[in-house]
Each structure stands twice: as structure tokens, then as C-alpha cells.
Image (cartoon, helix red, strand yellow):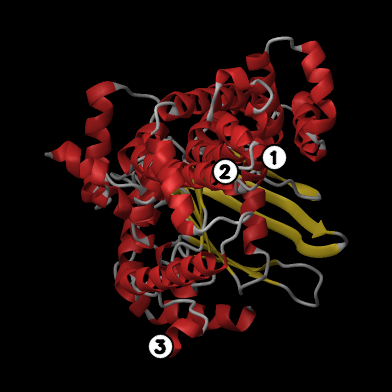
Amino acid sequence: MIEYKKEELILSVNNVSLAYDDKPILKDINMQVHNVTRPGMTQGQIVAICGRSGCGKTSLFKLLSGYNKPNAGDIKVGVDQHDVKTGEMGVVPQDYPLFNHRTIMSNLSLALTSMKGKEKIDLIKQYAEHFEITDQLDKYPCDLSGGQKQRVSILQQVLAGNKFILLDEPFSGLDTIMKDKVVDLLLKVSNLDEMNTLVVVSHDIESSCAIADTVLVLANKNNEGSTVVKTYDLLDEGLAYHKGIKELPRFREILSEIKGLI
Amino acid sequence: MKKIFSPRFLESVSVRTMLIIGIIQIAIFLFIAQVNGNELLPKPTGILNSSWKIITGPGFLDNFFATLGLILKGMVISITISLAIVYLALIPAFKGIAIFVSKLRFLTYTGLLFVFTILIKDGSDIKISLLLFGIIPYFVTSLLAYIGDIPKKEYELCYSLKFSTWKTLYEVVIKGKLHLVLEVIRQNFAIAWMMITSVEGICMSEGGLGTMMIKSNKYLKMDDVFGVLIVILILGIVFDYLFDVMKVWIFPYTDTTRYNKLWINKILRR
């Protein structure tokens, strides 16, 4: 069994509801994310929010990012649990927007404002190597593939110093090999800093659950708006951080349960 | 053969085929014009002779530069004023000004010519003012449309990178859309080029291609009128091409494949 501790609360969603023109989208969403610590290593957090297409995942994503406000309830972040503000969360949307008029190096440089000169360039190059985008640094976003853009987009958020990074459908449109690469990358990002928290919103249950320590299942029953129908604590289950998690019988069982729930 | 007479969506017709189609169509047009030419609509050979005479004539360069100077001056002032109006439109307190200026495109300057003449005494200044009056509303309208079409996600990206409001304005609206400004300039240059002939008629002593045409019109020298028209058309097409090349050259991200093949780069690399 992996040794871990759940420390302070760093993200909480309390009774959040959202409706557009009286049409309920989300209803009474609740979730809590604690800082997970493991002895002798830096361990971030990964939360997966799973649900079927059109169940309000992106609406929840917009609320978490602070771009939209809920009709009821609140979202609090940080150790001091303050209300989430626009721009406080790092966001990697589905189509990975970048500044198209800037090269990749320039895009990344723009995100890293805390440094200047050679030191800044060296750090970007160092990260670029980790993210396998060194060859793309002098190119423009229009010359990159979807997967490369995604990596740049994630790195941009990391360099901007965002501890909370929300990812909307990071596995969408990727083949199996690319999915595994993204899984590795997300694990790498989450473990860059103790407080790094990734919230992955996805309909790809298997890939998102495979990297998460907490899984929230979102479903819309009776057309009253989607709500969290079940939360899986994969740490408690002893599944999180397992290299071969996808092959474990309990993991397969959980996947079947989730498919039944949504 | 069937291919060129049915709609094409994904497959493109080769440059060679398009060139052949174009040449055939021009040849047919010239033949019809040559056969049916009369006093009012001169024959292509007559127009060609006139165009050649105009280009090689003693006053052509002076007139050409008079027109070009006027148009460039008008464009520079128009761009400066229009950009100021459009960028200020992002501040709610100034948005009304941009909307009002945009609506001015429905006004015709013919009715206001008298007011302009009384208010601005100098002939050259009247020409510039009319050009500004003609260009700015279109320029503002096009730019407002482009800015209105900026996807929300571009602003959201700036928020997530913790940019200030002003930095977001600079990065997304000003720097990020400069290539569109050049595209709007290109379109409006065509409008200005079209307007120039009538504007130049206001103060003919300064010369210009428009003046040349008005004078020929006055004496019913239709060969010369069409000759000047052809010269104006060709110059307009050349400028349009240069603007297009300039856009790719200055802003490579608009078409990196074309940028790498651009003739300017090939010359510079030598």
C-alpha cells in the first residue's frame, strides 16, 4: 500500500448549481480536493471529472476557471479558501489556443514573466526538452500538430506559475500511443510541485481515471441538471499511482461501475 | 473538359489550366470588343495604343506620382484616425464614436462637397478630406467586424496567463490582429484607388491620373479615357498583389508555407 497523507483543503466546490434560461445544467455539485503528500517525494493532485458528452462538463469547467459564475453555491481555492477569481486557474481548453502571431518560444516566454534574459531562455529550453517540443520552438502554432499544441499549451500554463490547471478533454482525438504520452506528461506536471492540482474534465473514462487520485462521476438523471453521482477515492482504494493500474481488476470494476452510472 | 464545367470544392484546378481558361476568355472578350468597337466603346487596339502613349508620354510619371502621393497621404491619415477610433471602441465610453463613424458610410460626399469647399479653402486639403471621409467609415466598419469576431478563448488565454487588461488589449487586439489591419488597408486601398479619379477632379491644377481622365472625357477622347482606365486598373492590381505579398512577408504566421517560398526571401537569401 502506498503511504500518503491528505493535508489541507485546497479546492472546494460547494452546492454549485447552474441554469441557462431556466434550463438546469448543473445541480448541487460538491467536491473537495486536499493536498496529498507522500514521504520523500513531490506529489501533486489529479482529479478526474467524468461524464457523457453534453452532461455539463464544460460548463463546470468554465465555473471552475472563474470565467462564469454559478447561480448558486461557491467555488473556493487555495489554503485560505478564497472565492475563485477569473485568471486564477490555468486553463487548457480543448482546442489549445495559443498566440498565433508568436513563435512557440515567444508564446512560452510570454507566460514566464518572473524571469528575464538568458536564464529565462534556458529554463524554457529545459522544459521544452521535458515536453518534447524542442524542435518546435522556432515554429508558429499553425505549423504544429494538435498533440504538439497541447503540450505547448500545458507548458505555457506551467510556466505561468499556475498551481491549478484545468484541462478540458485532454485525450480527445488522440490515438492510444499519444494518450499514453499525455498521461505521462500530466503525471509529470502534477509532480512538478507539491501544490500542483490538475482537474481533468473528460469523457474518456479509462485514460482520465488511470492518472487520477480522485474521480467524480457526473450524470444527469431525470433532466434536473447534472450532479456528482459518485466519487471514487483511488488513493483509499489503493489504486492511484500504480504503474499498471489499467490492468488491475478493481480498476476494471470501477470503470464498469462508472459506465453504468453515466 | 467536364471538370472545368462542374463545381469544384476540395480538388483545385491546376494553375496551368486556370491560365489557359483565362487566356481563352480574354481572347474571346477582346475579339468581341474588337469586332463591335465604336465611337463610344473604343476597340482594344485603340485602347492599347492610347495606354502605351499615356505610359510613355511626358506627363505620365508626374501624374502617377501626384495620384500616388495623394492616395498614400490619404491612407496614412485614414489609418491613423481609424485605428485610434477602433482601439478606443474597446473602452465602453468611446464605443459610440466608432459606431457613429461606421454609419457615416451611408452618406454621400457629393452633397457635402459644398460644405467641404467652404470650410477647407485649399484644393489639396479638400481632396485629402474627401478621401478621409470616404475611407474612414469603411475602414472602421471592417476593423470593428474583425475585432468583434475575435474568439473569447483568446481573451481567456490572457486571463489564464495573468495578463493585465492593457496587456491583453495589446497582445490580442493590437499585435495579434495587425495582419488583419493590413488586409483592411489592402481592401480600402482599392476603395481609395476607385475614389481618386473623382476626388482629383476637384483641384485639377495638381494633376493626377484622375485629372488626365477627366480632361480626356471632356474632349470625348474615348480611346484616352479607356487608356487611363486600363492604366489605373493595372496599377491597382499591381498594388493589390504587393499588399498581399507584404502581408505574408511581414506576418509569416498568416501562411508559413507561402512565406518560405516568397520571392522576396529568395532574393534576400542570395
Between B134 and B196, the one nearer to me in the picture: B196
Residue kind at label 3, given as amino acid type: Met
**How far across and how far down the image is residue A83, in percent?**
68, 37
Residues at marks 1 and 2 on the same chain: yes
Q: Residue furthest right?
A: A22
**How far across and how far down the image is residue B103, in percent?**
80, 37
Query: Please, what secondary structure does the residue beneath circle 3 have?
Result: loop
Please give the count of numbered marks on the rendered protein: 3
Q: Residue furthest top?
A: B121
Residue kind at label 2, given as amino acid type: Val
- Labels 3 and 1: the sequence-earlier one: 3
Q: What is the crowding at mark 3: few (fewer than 14 residues within 10 Å), some, or many (at least 20)? A: few
- In the rendered image of this protein, does residue B43 appear above or below residue A178? above
Mark 1, mark 2: which one is toward the viewer? 2
Q: CA distance from mark 3 to mark 2?
A: 39 Å
- In the rendered image of this protein, does residue A249 appear above or below residue A125? below
In the figure, is residue A259 to the left or right of B255?
Answer: right
Badge 2 is on which residue?
B225
Residue drawn 81% across the image and 59% down it: A19
Location of the C terminus of chain A (image quadrant): bottom right
Q: CA distance from mark 1 to mark 2?
A: 33 Å
Residue kind at label 1, given as amino acid type: Thr
Residue A232 badge: none
Q: What is the crowding at mark 1: few (fewer than 14 residues within 10 Å), some, or many (at least 20)? A: many
- Labels 3 and 2: the sequence-earlier one: 3
Residue B1 badge: 3
Between B92 and B155, the one nearer to me in the picture: B92
Tell which subunit mark 2 falls on.
Answer: B
Q: Quadrant of residue A104?
A: top left
Tell which subunit mark 3 falls on.
Answer: B
**How far across and how far down the image is residue B179, in percent?**
47, 40
